[in-house]
Every structure is written in C-alpha cells, then in structure tokens.
Image (tube, rainbow, N blue to C red):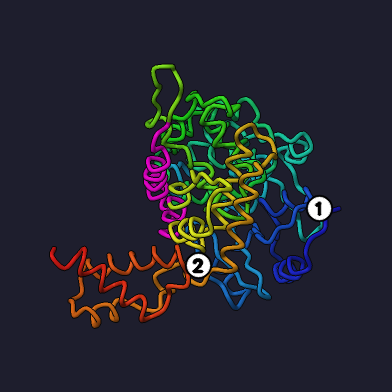
C-alpha cells in the first residue's frame, strides 16, 4: 500500500465517473514509494486531450499535439497525457508523431528509466510495474528501459538526467545504461542550453552533486557541457590540498549550501581558472597568480553559455572574483570597512559560505580555520556598527559636489565621491556635509582642477 494524496484521489474520481482509465505515473509514484515528498503529479489516461478538456474547467494545452494538457484542479497542477506510442525521434527531443493507444503498458514502454515507469492504477488502487522499477529502487540501481542506446537517442537530455538521478538518489547506474550514455554524446550535443541548465540546477540542488559530476566526467558528458571544468582534472595543488583542482571543486560544491544556487555554482567554479594561471618558480613550487580573476571571467562565460539569468551570472562571477581574501587579526576596523565596501555588504553571507565550502574542499573535512571564524565575527561587528559603507551612505551626493565646485557632470564627480568614501571608511566621524564638501574642494583643487 502507498499513500496517495487526497487531491489526487479527488482528481481521479472525475475520470472514473466518466469511465476513463486513470493512472498516476512517473516521478510522483517513484517518490511516494521512496517515502519522499512530491508535488508534481503526472496522470496517464485513455481519455483524449479534447475529452480531458471537457471534464475540467481550467485546462491549458501545453503539449496538446503530443497528447498532453495541464489541468488546474483545487489549486493543484496536474499534467495529463493520453496513453501513446511514439514514432522516431529526429531532433533528439520529441517524436515526429504520436499514436494514441488504449494500453497503459504500451505507454510505459516509451519512458526513460525503470524507476520512472511504475504506474499506480487510481481506479483499482494497484501498482503496475512491468519493467521491474520497484526492484531497481530496492537495489538503488538506475536502469534504462529496453535498449539504452534507443532510449538516449530519443531524448539527448536523458543521459544528463541519469547522472542527476544518480546524485539525487545515490543510485548506481547499471553498466549497459552507462555505456549508453557514452554512445549518446552526439545526441546530447543537440540539446538546448536551457534544458541542460535546468538539469544542472536540479543536480546542484542534490545532497551530493559530486556524484553526478564524476559520472559526467567518466562518461564524457562533462567535456561536452562544461569543458572548462573538465580541464581541471589532474591539475596539481599545493601541499595544503589533498586533491587536484577538479576534485577540490567538487567537494567544495558538496559543502556549499544546497538551497543557494549561486553559492553552489561559485563553489563549483571558483578555481576553474587555475589551469590557465598555473606556473612554477625555480624551486618547482606551484603558483596560481591572479587565478581568481581568470576564474571569474571563465565562470561568467560558462553561466552565460548555459543561459542562466543575469542575476545568477553576475552573482556567481562576483563571488568567484572575491573568494581569495586574506584576513589577519591585525586588520583594523577601517580595513574591514574597506573590504565590505569593495565586495558589498549584501554579499558578505554568501562570500563567507563560499569560503567555508572552499576550506572544507581542501581535504573534504568539516574543519574551518580559526582565522575565518575570527574574520566572520569582525565582519558582523563592523556591519552592526558602521554607518557608512557605500556612496549612498555619504552625507553628500553628486549634485552637492557639482553645485559646490561649479563643475559639470563627468568622471571627476565619481572620482571625488569615491575619494570621500575612502576617507570616511577610515574615519566615520568625517561623514558630515560641511566637512565632506571642504574635503571635496581641497581634493579637486589639488588633484583635478588642472587636468
């Protein structure tokens, strides 16, 4: 017996009253069997899309040409698909045509993995498992239905999904299925960046994303999707590290908070520029001068290529660019204020999360340095006390400066304001209108007026 949510039973009763078959299928059944929470409900039925449309008030024709509509019922979204047999896949994503069938067994044959091909008959209250999905769930095995090469040729995203499922559930990919991934790289190459991105987001949200990324490396997917990360394999690290650059990045990613996509991406990519920055001195010591800037530029290119939002692209690059701060207890309050002004007070929590993940990734242990703990305390002390950390906190603005000095808008105004900010970061008591305008006048006359 498995527990079916009441809203699903209520939804199915509409089909049953109208003499249609109704099955809960896909990930919802899998997750319910595994005792996981689910809110994505896929329904398979012998009712045609136009018949489903007549049964419910709110129906969206999301994929009606392939037999799928989306139904909003009692505030819950259901994706309803008519039992179907699919023709050849020419684009590595969708079948050229579908044929509706009265058989749920025929419909289940077209699905990707056995664990996703279990159906629950909402009419009889019985599980239907023609491909051994429940046994694979017990054994923690991910297995393609039928011939893996055929399944992966049908949809090039399925190999990436296999790696994601493996990480999400900590399942082993069955040998023939894994070989099918290696054989499907040409099909994967045709998948849109947006679909790859969405799958990577799900992978990054899993408890141990390194499982999936290692499988992507072994299968050749990583070199296809993120070749910059692939190049980090085998790149050595200094003595404090236990791993090469690639493994360090994976374990840092694991250690980052799974609910924060930006920090997880930054952890995965924060040293991705090290292969380019690598050098050795005359004694053979390793150096990665400027790798944080190189890594930030590469991270920005990767996230743009994968069509992440501008917010994620810029946020990830910013964290990577500033992850290499070097704090000591000799830092004055003014030095900490300047650091906060440089990286942005709103970025401090994420930057600290990234640095903690970076340290854990050194040897995949939970140890955090005393220095980082001390810096975190100092940062939050200053954040609680500081009155001025940004240009917006100054008691004067650009218009005040222009009126006081009788100058026109231009780069000089920005130079003056930034100079004032640096002075106030050193001494917060200087943030008074008269003092700032006097400082602006002296700086302008001594440094800028003659330019």
**Neighbourhood count class around disc 1 (C-alpha, 10 Å): few under 14, some 14–19, many 20 upward:** few
Q: Identify the secondary structure beneath mark 2.
A: strand
Bin the neighbour count of mark 2 within 10 Å (Cα to Cα): few under 14, some 14-19, many 20 and up: some
Q: Position of residue 232 (x, y in %)?
A: 46, 30
Q: Position of residue 268 (x, y in %)?
A: 52, 42
Residue 29 drawn at (x, y percent): 73, 52
Q: Is residue 300 magenta?
A: yes
Residue at the spot 41% in from the left edge and 29% down from the top edge: 275
Magenta stretch, residue numbers:
288-317
Q: Which disc, if any, is residue 126?
A: 1
Q: Quadrant of the C terminus?
A: bottom left
Question: Residue 364 colored magenta?
Answer: no
Q: Say which quarter of the image contains residue 17.
A: bottom right
Image location of residue 224, percent across then percent down: 42, 34
In the image, farthest residue toward the right: 1
Q: Is residue 154 above or below residue 52?
A: above
The answer to which of 339 and 84 lies nearer the viewer is: 339
38 up-or-down from 130: above or below: below
Element at label 1 = strand
The residue labelled by disc 2 is 61
At x 57%, y 63%, the residue is 382
User: Is residue 272 among what the camera can see?
Assistant: yes
The residue lying at 43 percent from left, 16 percent from top is 283
From mark 1 to mark 2, how far is it between C-alphas? 29 Å
Mark 1 in CB contact with mark 2 (< 8 angstroms):
no
Q: Where on the picture, by quarter, is residue 400?
A: bottom left
Q: Which mark is residue 210?
A: none
């Amino acid at each position: 017996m498995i527990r079916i949510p009441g809203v699903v039973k209520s939804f199915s009763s509409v089909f049953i009253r109208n003499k249609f078959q109704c099955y809960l299928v896909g990930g919802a059944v899998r997750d319910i069997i595994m005792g996981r929470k689910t809110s994505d409900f896929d329904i398979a039925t012998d009712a045609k899309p136009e018949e489903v449309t007549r049964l419910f008030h709110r129906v969206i024709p999301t994929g009606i040409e392939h037999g799928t509509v989306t139904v909003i019922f009692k505030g819950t979204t259901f994706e309803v698909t008519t039992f179907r047999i699919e023709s050849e896949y020419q684009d590595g994503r969708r079948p050229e045509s579908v044929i509706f069938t009265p058989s749920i067994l025929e419909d289940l044959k077209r699905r990707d993995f056995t664990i996703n091909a279990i159906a629950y008959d909402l009419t009889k209250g019985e599980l239907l498992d023609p491909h051994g999905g429940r046994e694979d769930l017990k054994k923690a095995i991910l297995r393609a239905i039928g011939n893996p090469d055929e399944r992966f040729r049908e949809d090039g995203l399925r190999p990436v999904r296999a790696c994601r499922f493996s990480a999400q559930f900590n399942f082993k990919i069955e040998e023939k299925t894994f070989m099918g991934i290696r054989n499907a790289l040409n099909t994967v190459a045709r998948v849109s960046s947006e679909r790859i991105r969405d799958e990577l987001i799900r992978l990054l949200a899993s408890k141990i994303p390194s499982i999936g990324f290692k499988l992507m490396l072994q299968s050749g997917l990583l070199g296809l999707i993120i070749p910059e990360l692939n190049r980090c394999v085998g790149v050595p690290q200094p003595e404090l590290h236990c791993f090469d650059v690639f493994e360090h990045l994976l374990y840092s990613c694991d250690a980052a908070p799974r609910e924060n996509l930006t920090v997880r991406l930054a952890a995965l990519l924060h040293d991705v520029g090290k292969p380019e920055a690598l050098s050795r001195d005359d004694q053979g010591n390793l150096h990665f001068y400027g790798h944080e800037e190189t890594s930030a530029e590469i991270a920005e290119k990767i996230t743009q290529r994968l069509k992440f939002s501008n917010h994620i692209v810029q946020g990830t690059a910013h964290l990577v660019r500033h992850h290499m701060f070097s704090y000591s207890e000799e830092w004055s309050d003014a030095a900490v204020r300047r650091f906060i002004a440089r990286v942005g007070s709103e970025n401090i929590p994420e930057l600290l999360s990234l640095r903690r993940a970076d340290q854990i990734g050194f040897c995949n242990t939970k140890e955090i340095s005393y220095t980082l703990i001390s810096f975190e305390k100092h940062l939050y002390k200053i954040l609680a006390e500081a009155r001025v950390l940004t240009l917006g906190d100054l008691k004067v603005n650009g218009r005040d400066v222009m009126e006081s000095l009788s100058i026109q808008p231009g780069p000089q105004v920005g130079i003056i304001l930034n100079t004032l900010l640096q002075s106030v970061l050193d001494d917060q008591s200087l943030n008074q209108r008269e003092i700032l305008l006097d400082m602006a006048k002296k700086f302008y006359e001594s440094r800028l007026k003659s330019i």
